[in-house]
Image (cartoon, rainbow, N blue to C red):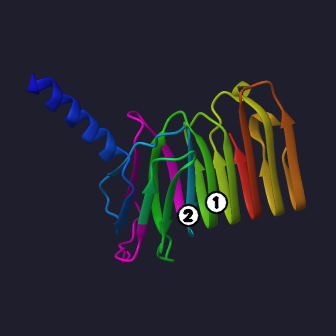
Amino acid sequence: MWKPQVLVMGLLGAALAAQTPVDTRGMTRAWEDLGQPVGNVLSLDLEAAGVTILPSEDGHVRTRFVGDKEPDLSRLRTRFKPTGNPAQLRISNTPHNDFQFEIQVPRSIGLILRMTAGEVKIQGIEGNKDLRLHAGEVTVQVGDPSAYGPVSASVWAGEIRPGPFGEGKEGLFRSFQHEGHGAYSLQVKVKAGEVTFK
């Protein structure tokens, strides 16, 4: 009778371990598995960098360094809280010399991104997107445009390229809005820079 109990306890232990917050230092070129978010929304709090956000097939969140240079990453800190809605990923103390990295997230998940400056590329992620950047470039691969309902983008100074949603705009205090019939919302705000949907 003890074997089923041991199996159940082992499964419970693995589930609890998967929900444990992660706090690490540094980043390598190998994917680091941080765990799986419990809810269906992930909040990303990032500092200046170039980041590409990609889908993971198993629903886990991972990070890896991909830059050409070899900066000192000993002070870089990654904190991941898988529980809550949203789950939270914060990457801080990034170097200031063209730091480039990638993040894998579940393919179907809502994203809330707040970033100081840099370049953001989002590819193959299905779900709501609320993205804000002080300065830099945001590029979103939207996939099927009909999957989106409300779409909006704004820049204090810069350019908006709406791609499949309409005509581009550039200059000061520019904004773009599109109302579709899909389930997802897409909102991007950049103070100075470029927004591209494709």
Q: Which mark is residue 114?
A: 1
Q: Is residue 53 left or right of residue 72?
A: right
- Residue 58 falls inside the magenta stretch: yes
Tag 1 near tag 2, CB within 8 Å: yes
Q: Residue at the far front: name it.
A: 1
- Residue 71 falls inside the magenta stretch: yes
Which residue is at 78% across, 42% downward? 162
Which quadrant of the structure image shows residue 85? top right
Q: Which residue is mark 2?
A: 46
The C terminus sits in image quarter: top right
Q: Amino acid at mark 1?
A: Arg
Q: Residue 164's x, y, as percent?
A: 76, 34
Position above or below: 177 against 57: below
Return the residue nearer the eye: 110 or 161.
Answer: 110
Position above or below: 73 against 23: below
Return the residue nearer the eye: 33 or 191.
Answer: 33
Position above or below: 111 against 64: above
Q: Residue 118's x, y, as percent?
A: 61, 65
Specify start and end residues of the magenta stretch as a single range: 49-77
Which quadrant of the structure image shows residue 173? bottom right
Q: Amino acid at mark 2?
A: Leu
Q: What is the secondary structure assignment of the residue under circle 1?
A: strand
Which residue is at 22% across, 30% downward? 8
Q: Residue 88's x, y, as percent?
A: 52, 54
Real-space Cα separation, disc 1 to disc 2, in angstroms: 6 Å
- Mark 2, residues whose alpha carbon is within 10 Å: few (<14), some, or many (≥20)? many
Which residue is at 84% across, 46% downward? 168
Q: Earlier in the sequence, mark 1 or mark 2?
A: 2
Q: Residue 5's x, y, as percent?
A: 17, 28
